Image (tube, rainbow, N blue to C red):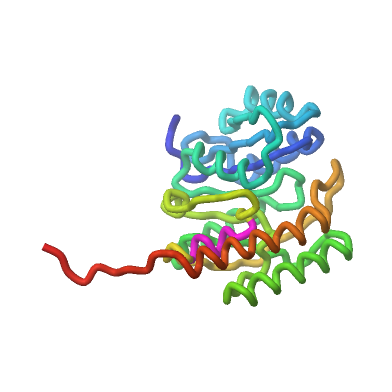
Amino acid sequence: MPTPELSVIIPVYNEAENIDQTVEEITSTLGNDPDRLEILFVDDGSTDDTLHRVQAAAEQFPVVHWLSFDGNYGQASAFDAGLHAAHGRFLATMDGDLQNDPLDIPELMRHFYSADLVCGYRRRRNDSLVRKISSRIANGVRNWATGDDIIDVGCSLRIMRRECVERLTLFEGLHRFFPTLIKMEGFRVVQVPVNHRPRIRGHTKYNISNRLFKSLADLFAILWMQRRRLRYRIRDQH
C-alpha cells in the first residue's frame, strides 16, 4: 500500500443507497490518485447490500478500500478499526449518509498550520427539531462538565494528524469525545464551520434513547479519565 496524503474513513451500516454517490463526491473533490487519497469504508455488519456496493466501488476506483466486521459493533468500533487500518499521513472521518459534504475537506486541510485536529461544526443542522434539541442539550452538558469548548461534538467530519491516533484509546461511545480525548494528550484543536445536508436516502440509526442517555454514562467516563490521568513531568535525569 502507498502512503497517501489523506485517508477518509467512513463507517457504514445499511447505507447501500448512499455508497456510489459518496465515492463519486469524494473522488470528484479529491481525485482518484492512490498516492494522494485513500477512501476506507468500514462495514459495521450491514444486513443490506452495503458491502457489495463498496466492493463494486473498489473495483472501479483504485482509491477505495474496505474492511468488514462479522457483526454490528457500533460507530466507535468502526472509527477505531478504520483509523488504525488507514495508511494516510492525515486521517479524516465522516458519516456515510451524505449529510457531511466532501467539499469541506480541502478547507479543513488548510488549517493544519495551527492544529493537530481540525473539527467541523455544522452551521445549519438539517435534522429534526427533536434531534437538534437533544444534541444541543448534550453538547452543553458535556462542555459544562469537562470544561471544554467544543461547538459540535456530534459532527463526524474531522481531520487529524496520524500522531493523534497513535496516542488515542477509544471505548464504546467515546467517539463523541474525540476532540476532548485528543486535547487531553496535548494536541491542538481547531474548529471550522462546515456544511450539513439533509438525509435523502436511508434511515437514521440514532434517537434520543441511544444518544442522549447513553452519552451521560460516557460523560462520567471522560470525567474519571480527566481526573485520574497521569500528569507527571520529568525535571531531570541521568
Residue positioned 58% across, 72% down in the render: 146
Considering depth in this image, is 73 or 114 the residue closer to the camera?
73
> In the visual, does 183 lie left or right of 72?
left
Q: Is residue 227 left or right of residue 76?
A: left
Instruction: Kindly report the secondary structure that dominates the magenta region of the rendered protein.
Output: helix
Give residue 40's position: percent from left, percent from top. 59, 37
Q: Nearer the viewer, residue 10 or 168?
A: 168
Which part of the image, by quadrant, shows the C terminus?
A: bottom left
Q: Position of residue 98 (x, y in %)?
A: 76, 47
Q: Quadrant of residue 221?
A: bottom right
Residue at position x 59%, y 56% in the image? 158
Give the extent of the magenta segment.
176-183
Residue name at image x 64 percent, y 77 percent: 144
x then y, percent, for residue 24: 70, 38
Q: How many marks?
A: 0
Between 90 and 235, the one lying in front of the other is 235
Quadrant location of the N terminus in the rendered image: top left
Is 33 covered by the magenta stretch?
no
Name the residue: 58% across, 35% down: 32
| x, y percent for residue 216 | 70, 63
125 above or below 51? below
